[in-house]
Amino acid sequence: MTALDLGISPCPNDTFVFHALIKGRVRAKGLEFNPFLLDVQELNRLAFKGRFHISKLSFHAWLKLKDSYEILDSGAALGRGCGPLVTAKSKDIDLASAKVAIPGELTTAFLLLKLWRPDIQNVAAVPFDQILPGLETGAFDAGLIIHEGRFVYEDRGFVKIVDLGDWWEKETGMPIPLGCLAVKKEGAALSHKKEIEAAIARSASYALENRAASREFIKRRAQEMADDVIDRHIDLYVNDFTLSLGEEGKNAVKTLEEMARWRNLMS
């Protein structure tokens, strides 16, 4: 039996997709998975140290790690209408001079922000769940929100400045590539790539066919505990691209890389 360390986020889309695999509802022959649940920016950071055999990564981070990590066809987060949002207390804000909270410099959200507005320079990287509280206290003038934050920001008194997913789709006509699963190119994981991909796809399919099975597992880890928020999160980020990137997903990733390199944002 080959044991592989698996790093995923505690967000509802990941815990929903990987619940069956972690709990043994589906299996990969000859493989067992040791799960570690960490914030995506922490996963990105640890990937540069080669910490996990398999890891969820922002596409931004993976583009910088292509020499050491290989992308998997399953487990990714892509879609339409699911992009990061820039929010503030008022639309009358000068973003060029504002202090903007971001969920990490390696997140795809931050790469999209730089593609949209390269003049935004005053940024502060904080865990994603600290962005809205920071806006409430006035520590930040604007925030780049991801995950559950997009479902609750209005209830907390903030307005949307821009939906970077909408901007991306208008610019490219493609789904927005947010996060992926990747395996280290050295060691045991890469030799089992096909089995891992198939197991993740089966776990996602099981979750979609048995939606109630993972609810307790998800709720113990979710930042926003309301069932309707969890359901909206899953519905937004878990889709056909989670089962397989396909040609459309691969082209979206290629376009993101080309745009970032053209703007000299990959150094």
Image: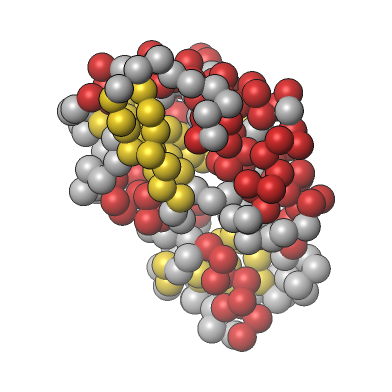
Give the image location of residue 100, x and y in percent.
51, 71
Q: Which corner quadrant of the image does residue 209 belong to?
A: top right
Residue 55 placement: quadrant: top left
The residue under the point 54% across, 22% down is: 26
Residue occupying image coordinates x 67% and y 53%: 219
Q: Quadrant of the N terminus?
A: top left
Which residue occupies the foreground of this view, 2 or 120? 2
Viewer-proximal residue, 44 or 22? Answer: 22
> Is 32 located above or below residue 107 in the figure?
above
Number of numbered discs: 0
- Residue 234 is left or right of residue 5, and the answer is right
In the displayed image of the protein, which residue is found farthest to the left? 186
Q: Would you place residue 255 above or below residue 52 in this image?
A: above
- Can the viewer see residue 172? no
| Relative height, residue 199 to residue 176 (above, below) | above
Residue 226 in the image: x percent, y percent? 78, 57
Q: Is 54 on the left-hand or right-hand side of 245?
A: left
**How are the residues colored?**
secondary structure
**Looking at the image, which residue is at 21% across and 33% down?**
68
Q: Nearer the viewer, residue 133 or 254?
A: 133
x and y, in percent, of residue 167 in the image: 62, 44
Residue 45 visible in rendering: yes
Q: Is residue 148 left or right of residue 199?
A: right
Residue in view at x 81 percent, y 50 percent: 228
Residue 107 coordinates in the image, percent (x, y): 43, 51
